Amino acid sequence: MTTTTFDTERAEAFAGRMLDTLNSGALAVMISVGHRTGLFDTLADAGDLTSDELAEASGLHERYVREWLAAMTTGRVVEYEPTTQRYRLPAEHAAWLTRAASPDNLAVTAQFIPLVGTVEDEVVRCFREGGGVPYERFGRFHEVMAEDSDQTVLSSLLSHILPLVEGAEERLEAGVSLLDLGCGRGHALLALAERFPRSRFVGYDLSSEAIAHAREHAASRALGNVEFAVRDLSTFDVDAEPGSFDLVTTFDAVHDQARPLALLRGIRRSLAEGGAYLMQDVHGSSHVHENLDHPGGTLLYTISTMHCMTVSLAQGGEGLGTLWGEQKARELLTQAGFEAVEVHQLEHDPFNAYFVVRA
């Protein structure tokens, strides 16, 4: 019989870590509030302010602003001078928390924490009963996802991402057809349609609300070379029109599909001869032990549990998960009929991988 010795020092260290986790989780919620209300932007622009001055400048109620400032102060985000009762957002912190700091604004990402928390009861039910939480239960998700995508994709789409596909810019200049699957609010597609007026662009997404936004923006910009449609991509392997597109893109869309292999097979089917597929998805390994040092490992597995995986399972899908990883991605691309796969990472973007795929 073996006996185990209880390591008191280890236990106390873990308790401290858990307390730090609780404080950090609470801080993430308040950072989301600061972003949505514009408090970080106002504080960064105005310099040192009292809570009354910040509330007036922001058009918000002072009592809420004062309590938010207390959380920001104890969270070491905002600095406070008790003799003058003034608060200041250091420039070094503003560089990661304001709209002016985009694409480095981490307050955008913080919004995912309170957002996925709204479905906790339903996810707990799924732990016990199986199934999933459908996409429409997530309220602002497509809005937050669009804002996040603007930072990671839109900000570098023309300068860094599109050049990964050799010859893509020249072909789009001349006039080809491009399909974006899981397009959300269509920000990337709208940017491409505006930049390449001779080409034709099509976007599909499951969310009718997101597609409505995309159509509205296309109309407001008088873009006649782009169209959007609500489409369930779970049967895209048989629904895709053969050889109908010269380029296909997906941005952070494959891993939460109900049937990702069906989507990839449909992409392969829809590509014209000599066409290329550009897939941006989460960077990581398919093996959990290889993600121990991933800068966002815990965050990504949490978002997977609370959104990506459960949305797929709600459709009777595979529940692939956010961190499906490069190994699984290569496996599915091969099964879909692709032979040449290049994987790229951009220096400024440690969270995403860019797959350039050809038949």
Image: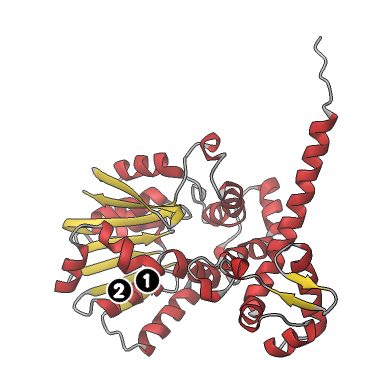
Q: Quadrant of residue 327?
A: top left
Q: Is residue 323 left or right of residue 268?
A: right
The image's colour scheme reads: secondary structure
**Disc 1 crowd, CA 10 A, few/some/many (<14, 14-19, 20+):** many
Q: Farthest front residue? A: 83
The type of residue carrying mark 2 is: Leu
For the N terminus, the quadrant is top right
* Residue at disc 2, secondary structure: helix
Cβ–Cβ under 8 Å for marks 1 and 2: yes
Q: Residue at x 58, y 48 (%)?
A: 301
Residue placed most toward the observer, 249 or 45: 45
Q: Which residue is mark 1?
A: 188
Q: Is residue 178 left or right of residue 216?
A: left
Residue placed most toward the observer, 144 or 10: 10
Residue placed most toward the observer, 220 or 119: 220
Q: Which residue is mark 2?
A: 192
Q: Is residue 57 left or right of residue 246?
A: right
Q: Is residue 196 left or right of residue 319?
A: left
* Residue at disc 1, secondary structure: helix
Residue 179 x, y percent position in the rendering = 29, 66
Residue placed most toward the observer, 154 or 44: 44
* Residue 118 makes an appearance in the image: no
What label does residue 330 carry, if any?
none
